[in-house]
Amino acid sequence: MDVQSGKMMDGLTGPDHLHLYKRERERVEGGGGGVLNYPRTVEEVFWDFRGRRTGILKALTTDAEEFYRQCDPEKENLCLYGFPGEQWEVNLPAEEVPPELPEPALGINFARNGMQEKDWLSLVAVHSDAWLLGVAFYFGARFGFDKADRKQLFDMINELPTVFEVVTDTAQKQVKEEPSVSNRGSNKSKSNSKLRRTSESQEKYLKDTQAKDEHQVIEEDEEHGLTLCGSCAENYASDEFWICCDICEKWFHGKCVKVTPAKAEHIKRYKCPSCSNKNAA
């Protein structure tokens, strides 16, 4: 089957993906003998994954116009295939049940005209990511990868951005926004926790996030600045460790009630000295 035109080739009369796979591997690796050599080691499976991923990325980025044209909603259910030789193909699913390899999402062409092209490409990208992982770990299961092999394979795959991240430019945005995203998470934890302290990540957050977020953080610090320690009656300071009593809800300097940050991590329900004495009485 000709990858781009869909014409009959090599005596095939239908979508014979196993033959395409064999031909692709023989062409790229210089193999021969007509034997279908599936990847068997972690490195070989990763090579297979990377080649298929590159082919799909071509379809969804540099070849997007041609890919869009081939996904005619008037045609039957179509799938997007990626091959180890970094090629792609839009074709019908394999006829055998179950197929030799996991099949990509079926009928991607039917949604083409029902949504914006950018959203449609993103949808195909998500399903392509799922298929790529499915094929990789199918090989892992078939050839008996143990826990260490599976982890190694996943770690190698995880070093690459997903197809969705590349198609939507999310990967580049994550690199640019990583400090602020990390610090927003830290700030959320700070807001929900009863431990009040300023960390390096929060300081970066105040510098790197947008003006609106900065304003909210400043307001929060000002609000806590009005809090008085239930023991020494001094104001809240952002560079000091504080803890809140779960009974009376008063705040205390950690040093005033002899509680360190490390100790506080193991306290499920903190009672200040005054509340502890009341309960004892």
Image (cartoon, rainbow, N blue to C red):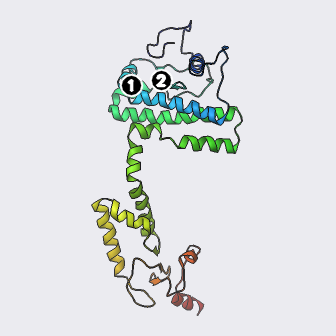
Residue 178 occupies quadrant: bottom left
Who's the residue at 41% across and 30% down the image? Answer: 60
Q: Could you say where residue 139 lies in the image, as x and y percent from the top left?
A: 64, 32
Residue at x-position 34% and y-position 65% = 206
Disc 2 packing (10 Å; few <14; some 14–19; many ≥20)? many
Q: CA distance from mark 2 to mark 1?
A: 10 Å
Q: Residue at x 52, y 8 (%)?
A: 9
In this rendering, is residue 203 above or below 276? above
**Is residue 159 toward the left or the right of residue 113 in the image?**
right
Whether pointer 2 and pointer 1 mark residues with C-beta atoms closer than 8 Å, the reply is: yes
Q: Secondary structure at mark 2?
A: strand
Look at the image and tell me in which quarter the C terminus lies.
bottom right
Q: Is residue 144 above or below residue 78?
A: below
The residue at the far bottom in this view is 281
Q: Which residue is mark 1?
A: 63
> Tag 1 or tag 2, which sits nearer the N-term?
1
Q: Amino acid at mark 1?
A: Asp
Residue holding disc 2: 88
Q: Secondary structure at mark 1?
A: loop
266 up-or-down from 122: above or below: below
257 displayed left or right of 191: right
Most distant residue in the front direction: 30
Q: Nearer the viewer, residue 236 or 267?
A: 236
Q: Residues within 10 Å of mark 1 (few under 14, many from 20)?
A: some
| Residue type, label 2 | Trp
| Picture quadrant where residue 179 is located | bottom left
Residue 21 picture location, percent across and down: 58, 20
